Image: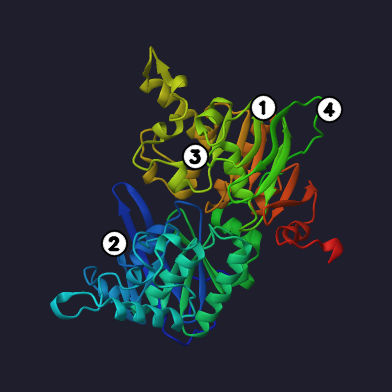
Amino acid sequence: MSVRSPASTDGPAGDLRPVVEAVHITKRFGSTTALSDAGIVVRPGETHALVGRNGAGKSTLVSILTGLQAPDDGAVAFDGRPAPPLGDRAAWRRRVACVYQKSTIIPTLTVAENLFLNRHDRGRGGLIRWSRLRRAAQELLATWSVDVDVRQPASTLSVEQRQFVEIARALSFGARFIILDEPTAQLDGAGINRLFTRLRDLRAHGVTFLFISHHLQEIYEICDQVTVFRDARHVVTAPVAELSRPALVAAMTGEDVTLPEADHPPLPADAPVLLSVRDLVTPSGAELSLETRAGEVVGIAGGGGSGKVEVAEAIVGLTRRAGGTVAVDGRVLRPGRVPDALDAGVGLVPQDRHREGLVPLLSIAENVTMTVPERIARRGLISPGRRDAVARSAITELAVKAAGPHVPVADLSGGNQQKVVMGRALANDPKLLVLITPTAGVDVRSKQTLLGVVEQVRRRGAAVLIVSDELDDLRICDRVLVMFAGRVIRELAHGWPDNELVAAMEGVDLHHA
């Protein structure tokens, strides 16, 4: 494998000035070096991947490329010209925009208001001309083929629609270089395909992308070039076609990393049923019946609209089921009551760690132990010593990269935040562990740790329910129930061909196609 430096000039547009060039970038935060002599070159018309483990320096580089902070050393140039001063936000918006994993759309405003926030067309007396605003918004979205009603509240947009609106907003400032931060983390397979189709269309119209993702298969599907960061440094830049998957993973981690493979021993005939779901119906009409025994890992797979997340949330009480019963180790759970599920021995990793899994301003210790106050109490009061001991154990077991239990979770990378959520799920030694999209938006090493925990939980005799459309998540399952349009349409035993599982999630039976 030939290694190229970030200043390499070969590529699909090697004779053109780079859209952006960052060279010899160093950035320190106190005693922590976030970037050390790192850099990247993105050329016109590329979709250029930026990959690396959580904490590799990707987010810091993005903040420098978007003018949110200045490097301590090094320089950034756009189209061969030095980057604008940090205070000139308008000049930065004309050059670059970032669509973050956590949306910057304001949900209480309409689509039109979000598109032209703080730059409304005003008439006499400084009053906003709403008809002109909506017309301009419609024209903007039509230009970039975004099919959204500009009058609707942004809170009603799907994740996919929010991303397209944010891209259109960035393009309206004149930027033709867009950074996409984990754009597929909350999309199903069909949504990802639509996103990639749109990106290819935009590239044909002169838009260049920096694509940040932990899903390596997406890198090979949509990207031309890939740059790898590791431990705050640039490691390699190369054409995607010339870098094998094992070589890419090795560049990211510095070693060969393989995801855990469960042994899948046969369950004892007398293994007790720990989860019994009978005739469950969700408010949206999805249905599920299921039994899971001690030591069994069962997957529920499906795309968007399949109902997989809805049934999982109804099982654990995040939503109130419309019908049916759920019992954990013989105890029937009360509908829509998370505390009742916790008391019965359920541990949960929810779908959205930002909204449902974490309290960002609280510490690791406070987040890990918030559902088990009785475990850390002494004479009716919370014992800081016991709380910290539980947190330290979770930090060690899950390899959380943090200085200690008192670090706010807001200061952690995405993968380490997800480990904290897992730590809380394990804090009550659950009989049933429910994981909803557990490895979305985390790096390869964090994924390895999180999935490795499942095997430990299984061996302790608990039951595990994994709700996901990620093949890596599902491969550790003993069997997988595939949902489509609110119904279970297939059950596959471990050892299924990947193409059969993917086809089933899309509603296709390969045996009768």
Which residue in the protein does label 4 denote?
269
The Cα atoms of the two marked residues, 1 and 4, are separated by: 17 Å
Instruction: Please report contact status of discs 4 and 3: CB closer than 8 Å, yes or no.
Output: no
Dot 2 or dot 4, earlier in sequence: 2
Which residue in the protein does label 1 denote?
460
Q: Is residue 146 left or right of residue 479?
A: left
Which residue in the protein does label 2 denote?
69
The amino acid on which the numbered mark 3 sits, given as a three-letter code, is Val
Q: Say which of marks 2 and 1 sits in front.
A: 1
The amino acid on which the numbered mark 4 sits, given as a three-letter code, is Ala
- The secondary element bearing badge 3 is classed as helix
Q: Residue furthest right?
A: 511
Q: Quadrant of the N terminus?
A: bottom right
Q: Residue furthest top?
A: 379
- The secondary element bearing badge 1 is classed as loop
Q: Is residue 176 above or below residue 330?
A: below
Task: State the image coordinates of residue 132 (x, y, percent, origin top left).
Answer: 30, 81
Q: Is residue 11 visible?
A: no
Instruction: Please report contact status of discs 3 and 1: CB closer than 8 Å, yes or no.
Output: no
